[in-house]
Amino acid sequence: MKRIKILAVVGSLRKDSYNRQLALAAKEVVGDRAEFTLLEYGDVPLFNQDIEHPAPEAVTRVRAEVKSADGIWFFTPEYNHYFPGVFKNLLDWLSRPISDKEPQVLAGKPAAISGISPGMFGTVLAQDHLVTLISFLNMKVMNVPRLTVPHAMQQLDEQGKLELKASYPYLEKQADAFVKFVQEHLQEK
């Protein structure tokens, strides 16, 4: 079986965000079972139909990365009980058809969702909103297991870096399930 390509999309642009650190931990857990990369999209402009065609270079680049991935793993923070605006902006660009002949790039892609936050409920509300959106965009959502990590501050080392403790086995379980989910999707194609 070919080595699958997983693209991690982190909902925060902060370079050391908890969710970016969670994505990097997931990359370690996945190991050599998949090519695992993080999507960099800080240069994607605000969506505006006046600049939609031709798409800005940053949009063309992120669309190509999404298109070439076998599965998309979202890592979302929760801002005011929702996922971040910058994340929504990216999804708005990705939801648009590339041209009259080429549809949007998210349709049919397997998707997993994780998130970490300092609060006591993790990112459960943001994840629920995200599921609504990506389901509408016709992604194949792996609803079980999802990972929501609460109390981020209790899972940091002395330097403020994420050191998953109680949540680590759940990340392993989700990684195993998502690799299998993507592989099964590819076999069905």
Image: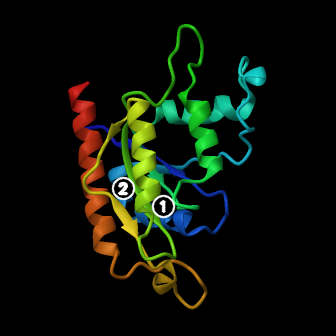
The C terminus - image quarter: top left
Instruction: State the residue at coordinates (31%, 37%).
Output: 2
Which residue is drawn at the image coordinates 45% and 47% (left, top)?
A: 130
Q: Nearer the viewer, residue 128 or 4?
A: 128
The disc at residue 137 is none
Nearest to the eye among marks 1 and 2: give it.
1
Q: Position of residue 75 (x, y in %)?
A: 48, 56
Q: Position of residue 20 (x, y in %)?
A: 55, 63
Q: Quadrant of the N terminus?
A: top left
Q: Which residue is mark 2?
A: 32
Query: Where residue 22 sits: x, y (%)?
Result: 47, 66
> Dot 1 corresponds to which residue?
23
| Extreme residue in the right direction | 50
Q: Is residue 150 left or right of residue 42?
A: left
Q: Earlier in the sequence, mark 1 or mark 2?
A: 1
Instruction: Give residue 121's quadrant in the image.
Output: bottom left
* Residue 132 sits in quarter: top left
Quadrant of the rendered structure where residue 173 is? bottom left
46 to the left or right of 136: right
The color scheme shown is: rainbow
Q: Is residue 94 something that shows in the picture?
A: yes
The outermost residue toward the bottom is 158
Q: Is residue 54 above or below residue 143?
A: above
For image coordinates 65% across by 48% down, the residue present is 86
Q: Residue at the far top: name it.
A: 101
Q: Position of residue 167 (x, y in %)?
A: 34, 75
Q: Residues within 10 Å of mark 1 (few under 14, many from 20)?
A: many
- Reply above or below: 140 against 116: above
Looking at the rendered structure, the kind of residue marked 1 is Ala
